[in-house]
Amino acid sequence: MENRPWQRHYDYSVPTTIRYPRIPAQLLMQVSVNAYPNKAALNFYGTETTFWDLRTQILRFASALGSLGVQKGERVGIHLPTCPQYVISYHAVLSLGAIAVNLNPMYTSAELKALVSNTEITTLITFDMVLPNIRPLCLEVEIPRVIVTKVTDYINGFEKSTPAELELEEGWHHFSLLIDNSSDTRVPRIEILPEDPALIQFTGGTTGIPKGAVLTHANLVAATLQISLWGGEIGRLTPPERRTVLAVLPYFHVYGTIVAMSWALFNCATQILVPRFELDEFIGLLAGFEEITFFPSVPTMINAVINHPKAQELDLERRLLFLNSGAAPMPVELIDQVRDMGMNYSEGWGMSETTSLGISNPLLGLRKVGSIVIPWPDTDVRLVDVDEGKEDVPQGQPGEILIRSPLVMKEYWANPEETAAQLKDGWLYTGDIAVRDKDDYFFIVDRKKDMIIAGGYNIYPREIDEVLYQHPKIQDAVAVGIPDEYRGETVKDFIVPKVGETLTEAEVSEFCNEKLAAYKRPKIVEFRKELPKSAVGKILRKVLRDEEAAKAKK
């Protein structure tokens, strides 16, 4: 408690330390399998798969992969959207002691080539809609085993695909046929240790090769236990028969992998799988469920859903029992709106390198708007000076977040230089800048790399973003530092107005003049129809900054 003073704010049911089972991560779901074998583990466009049937398919697929030659330690690329085939593939790969490599289905052939080459993937599990990218990839990189599924094969009413229909290349395998032709449901007799790698999660790089965070079985087990205990009151007050999670987060991102999939399987919740977020379609899906226990999401998604024209008639306040926001900070205006609606919500901070978790709101405890709040059990956090990264900064001063926790990755895959630069003496240097107040609550100021230095002033663009989101006509906004001959850098705002609204640069400037010091005010405003976003809906400030840097060089 002396070194973790924030623990005084923990909910009454949250332990200060956890005894983690020393088992492989895929075995955590066995609790739900035994307790509720006939409950739906998955709901995919109305087609349900029970916990028992899911376990059976995982083991049959693991047996099939083993028969094809997949061995412990090999890297298996999972190149799928959020669908039953992802859940089956992920757990089958882990059952063999192999390492799952999450691959974004939206990646181009060139992007995939870099990641496949980096991890030396021996098996790729992919799907019909992206084969135009996979065929040229396989001409450039040798992938010994390619397995293809059709997403609709797990929806009742659709005719099952065939290898001929998918025009599979010679030697490629059909996902469903592999399972159908495998009858062995024995658990693979492979020793898997807690420190063994389980998942490679690439960070969201926009130039060069993204870094692959290596997460171990111990990391995945710790993350599943921590999120289950941190939000334990959700489960305790909701009978297992009624527990659901709205799984719209992509499972190829660790946020979705842990906070939706792993939480659901361990807590006996039905995963309502949504492979893509299309707003009107999503609202229609919501209308089909009386209640959703847990909706992990991102700010842009929450904003779109609760402001949809049909939100009021759907009575979302009662339908969505608990919201969780991650990947990017919730604007204060959005937090106020959610609270006024009476919705229970939590906001947290995490990284791919910390198995997506780390710091978050207590469920019942003290909350402060704009704070990422307090570190989770068994987690130490320091704030150190931004320039040298050595000395702890005084209370209330901005410093880089250093974190030490069972959640922290083992290393970056095949990248000892980056590993050494960001992992030092057990501490992960996160690159995020925060302040800590008198109550030991943490507030993110910004990303170290996003900080704008204009005329000698340090400007944190998130502060500008917060002001912009207060404007009633603004839908999305982001502030970026761009090159400036006189000031070094200057502030430019990229803004998406709300549908039907007209907004001028003069209106934005006048609004900011009332709320920001002169040196923080935007000097340039650019209006756009949309802003670049990551797979989980996070606005990609770096993409815009790189665009501006490229313009400056011309």
Image (spheres, rainbow, N blue to C red):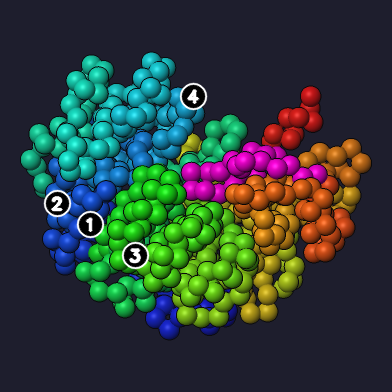
In the rendered structure, which amino acid carries the disc numbered 2? Asp
In what element is the residue under mark 2?
helix
Residue receiving disc 3: 292
Tag nearer the camera, 1 or 3: 3
| Label 1–label 4 contact, CB within 8 A | no
Residue named by callout 4: 110
- In the shown orientation, is residue 376 left or right of residue 68? right
Residue 41 belongs to the span the image colors magenta: no
Q: Which residue of the protein is positioned furthest toward the left in this rendering?
A: 183
Type of amino acid at the residue the image marks with label 4 = Ala
Distance of mark 3 from mark 2, alpha carbons? 23 Å
Closer to the chain start, of discs 1 and 3, is 1
Question: Does the residue at mark 1 contact the one at mark 2 (Cβ under 8 Å)?
Answer: yes
Quickly name the residue at label 1.
41
**Closer to viewer: mark 3 or mark 2:** 3
Q: Nearer the viewer, mark 1 or mark 4?
A: 1
Q: Is residue 516 left or right of residue 192?
A: right
User: What number is the disc on residue 53?
Assistant: 2
Residue situated in front as seen by the camera: 379 or 318: 318
Secondary structure category for the residue under label 4: helix
Contact (Cβ within 8 Å) of mark 3 with mark 2: no
Residue 61 vs residue 325, the one in the foreground: 325
